[in-house]
Amino acid sequence: MARYAEPVAGRELDWKYTEGFITERDDIALLRENSVELGIDAVSVAMGAQLAFVAATAAPESIVEIGTGLGVSGLWLMSGAPDASFTSIDSEADYQQVAKAALIEAGVTPNRVRLITGAASQVLPRMNDASYDLVFVDADPESVIEYVEHGIRLARTGGVILVAHALWRGKVADPAQRDEPVGAFRSLLGMLGESSGVTAALSPVGDGLLQLVKK
């Protein structure tokens, strides 16, 4: 029996169709446009929809996000789990204020939004083990292994860890690509694909969404 299915033709068309399947809310679309202008690599529309779907399915009481940006991913996550508490870490205080204003405008009460300004590598070690139901990682790709290790530690048993850009702009599957982010994601996927501590799945949505459940 063959291990892999035969390649499917027209995958680029599938990708475009998937990205256009969901109509993004106007407030999120505006933040996406502003993100592009500032050079922030926000999650794609399809990945945002996947985040909302996972959040709605997992029904988390607490979410922590590593990498706030302008709030595109935060709004998607909270659209799926509108009653959750939301913590987000980023080194850019100005971006965080934009994200917070967008979350509150979207109906998230201020007392459920906690923004921590600082480098994730310094903030994460100070955070308590098993404190969150859902962890979302979308920060410096070179440090993704460190962030995911912390994410697994922060998640409760049965908690979900999501990692954006896991196929890093379509480069991870191409053996000719060997830059630092590609190497970091390849190492991460190789490590977690064989881990007994998590249940793992890799979706090609956007430029790759790694989905983990902590055992």
Image (cartoon, rainbow, N blue to C red):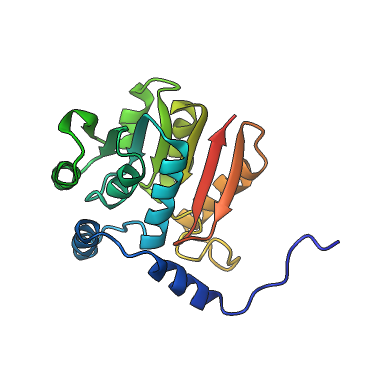
Rendering coords of residue 143 (x, y %) = 42, 43
Q: Residue furthest right?
A: 1
Depth check, front residue: 165 or 179: 165
Depth check, front residue: 46 or 138: 46
In the visual, does 82 lie left or right of 6? left
Q: Residue at x 41, y 57 (%)?
A: 47
Number of numbered discs visible in the structure rendering: 0
Rendering coords of residue 110 (x, y %) = 16, 32
Q: Residue at x 37, y 64 (%)?
A: 22
Depth check, front residue: 62 or 171: 62
Rendering coords of residue 159 (x, y %) = 49, 31
The C terminus lies in which quarter of the figure?
Answer: top right
The N terminus lies in which quarter of the figure?
Answer: bottom right
Q: Is residue 189 above or below residue 125?
A: below
Q: Residue furthest top?
A: 128
Depth check, front residue: 40 or 73: 73
In the visual, does 148 lie left or right of 189? left
Inspect this view and state whether residue 188 appears.
yes
Q: Residue at x 32, y 36 (%)?
A: 120
Q: Residue at x 44, y 74 (%)?
A: 16
Quarter of the figure with residue 212: top right
Rendering coords of residue 106 (x, y %) = 19, 46
Inspect this view and state whether residue 164 appears.
no
In the visual, does 44 lie left or right of 31? right
